[in-house]
Amino acid sequence: MTESTRQHGRLTRQPSDSTTRSFIGPAGKPVELRIPRSVRRRGDFDLVVHFHGAAWLPHQAVASLRNETVSAVVNLGAGSGTYDRAFADTVAFDSLLATVVREVATESGRAARTRSITLVGFSAGHGAIRRILRVPRYLRAIDAVLLHDGMHTSYVPDGKGLADGAVLDTLNLADFAALARAAMRGEKRFVVTHSEIFPGTFASTTETADWLLSALNLKRTPVLRWGPRGMQQLSHVKVGRFELLGYAGNSAPDHVDQLHAMPELLALTIRR
């Protein structure tokens, strides 16, 4: 399906004076790292780990924050299961964080440490985050999470949708509900966005968002306002430091809009 009723703005790659490095990370795939000049002078830093998407875009989104934030981008391939399995062993996330710190220390020539950790999952990338959140010590260590159009799960039984009597596999959603409750108490920051795309073979981000709100006993507030890149926001929920934003659109460009909206969505997620 294609549509042309709304603008689908796209970011363009901008030059940066940051240092970029790469190392082999989970599942033997390269992790792309961006280290800003301010971090090279200090050593301690905030960290944003982004799962799924061309590395330049999250790097540029993080750079727009104008603070001492390192960005690491992990791309493992198609499907949330690929990301989930890659982090099934806790060694994978431990090693990822330790290697980022080591690379920053090498670049700065001094001891390095993380001050805060933000995880960002676009589309299939949410699979890594849901697996990471299942480990209590990781949940305690993570400060904020952004899921942009990427909170999916399976139908049970497989092959049927909700209209045919299926239900959502909530095992993949329970940890997001726990994170949302912590955010509602002010302990974490959790931002979820979704489009209106219905994949058909697995649960849409609209359906999972509806489940999450029901589990939290929350209701949407209808809105109609323009968002970044020509997106059109239709609903909003905000309680404490938990926030959910619903956007119009059920075509592929609407999905990609959410990735290109990362500068604004990330600023919303990590604001103090």
Image (cartoon, rainbow, N blue to C red):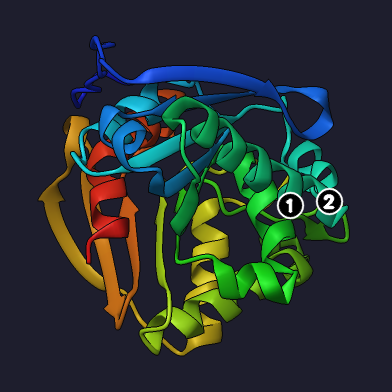
Q: Is residue 230 visible?
A: yes
Whether 69 is drawn above or below 134: the answer is: above
The kind of residue tagged 2 is Val
Residue 82 placement (x, y as % from top left): 80, 37
Q: Are marks 1 and 2 in contact (CB under 8 Å)?
A: yes
Q: Is residue 149 visible?
A: no
Residue that badge 2 annotates: 91
Whether 4 is drawn above or below 39: the answer is: above
Relative to 55, is 22 on the left or the right?
right
Q: Nearer the viewer, residue 217 or 85?
A: 85
Residue that badge 1 annotates: 94
The kind of residue tagged 1 is Asp
Relative to 253, is 80 on the left or the right?
right
Q: Quadrant of the C terminus?
A: bottom left
Residue 70 placement (x, y as % from top left): 41, 38
Q: Nearer the viewer, residue 164 or 26?
A: 26
Element assignment for label 1: helix
Relative to 87, is 146 on the left or the right?
left
- Residue 31 quadrant: top right
Residue 118 placement (x, y as % from top left): 46, 54
- Residue 254 quadrant: top left
Element assignment for label 2: helix
As measured in the structure, the alpha-carbon distance from the residue carrying label 1 to the one carrying label 2 is 5 Å
Q: Residue at x 20, y 24 (%)?
A: 5
Q: Residue at x 61, y 37 (%)?
A: 102
Q: Which residue occupies the extreme front position in the image?
A: 110
Whether 192 is drawn above or below 159: the answer is: below
Relative to 19, is 170 on the left or the right?
right
Q: Residue at x 69, y 73 (%)?
A: 137
Q: Residue at x 57, y 31 (%)?
A: 103
